[in-house]
Image: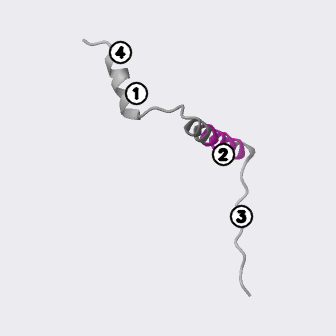
Amino acid sequence: MKRSRQIKPTSNAQTEQTLALLEILALGDRQIAAGRVQPAAEIIARLRERRPTG
């Protein structure tokens, strides 16, 4: 007889965190689909220009 896998129960907090991460991923997908993204290199360069020197 084959033994079935046991699923480890998760806490409500873990479930909420997982759902929050999935929502963030879905938001990112929607932003990409809408063209509301910029290359990371451009953003980093802009941030470095703003950074105070000295």
Q: Quadrant of residue 13?
A: top right
Task: Give how far across and how far down residue 24 sits, in percent.
Answer: 62, 38
Q: Which residue is mark 4?
A: 50
User: Of the residues tagged 1 and 2, which is closer to the observer?
Assistant: 1
* Sequence-wise first label, 4 or 3: 3
Magenta segment includes 54: no
Magenta segment includes 15: yes
Residue at (71, 80) in percent of width and height: 3
Task: Give how far across and how far down residue 1 sits, in percent.
Answer: 74, 88
* Sequence-wise first label, 2 or 3: 3
Residue at (59, 35) in percent of width and height: 34
Going by the numbered disc 2, the residue's amino acid type is Thr
Q: Which residue is mark 3?
A: 7
- Give the distance between the C-alpha atoms of the residues marked 4 and 1, in whole angstroms: 11 Å
Residue at (62, 38) in percent of width and height: 30
Circle 1 packing at 10 Å, graded few (<14), some (14-19), many (20+), is few
Along the line of sight, which residue is nearer the eye, 47 or 21? 47
Q: Secondary structure at mark 1?
A: helix
Region of the chain picked out in magenta, as a range? 14-27
User: Of the residues tagged 4 and 2, which is closer to the observer?
Assistant: 4
* Sequence-wise first label, 4 or 1: 1
Q: Which residue is mark 1?
A: 43
Going by the numbered disc 4, the residue's amino acid type is Arg
Q: Quadrant of residue 49?
A: top left
* Sequence-wise first label, 1 or 2: 2
- Give the distance between the C-alpha atoms of the residues marked 3 and 1, in whole angstroms: 42 Å
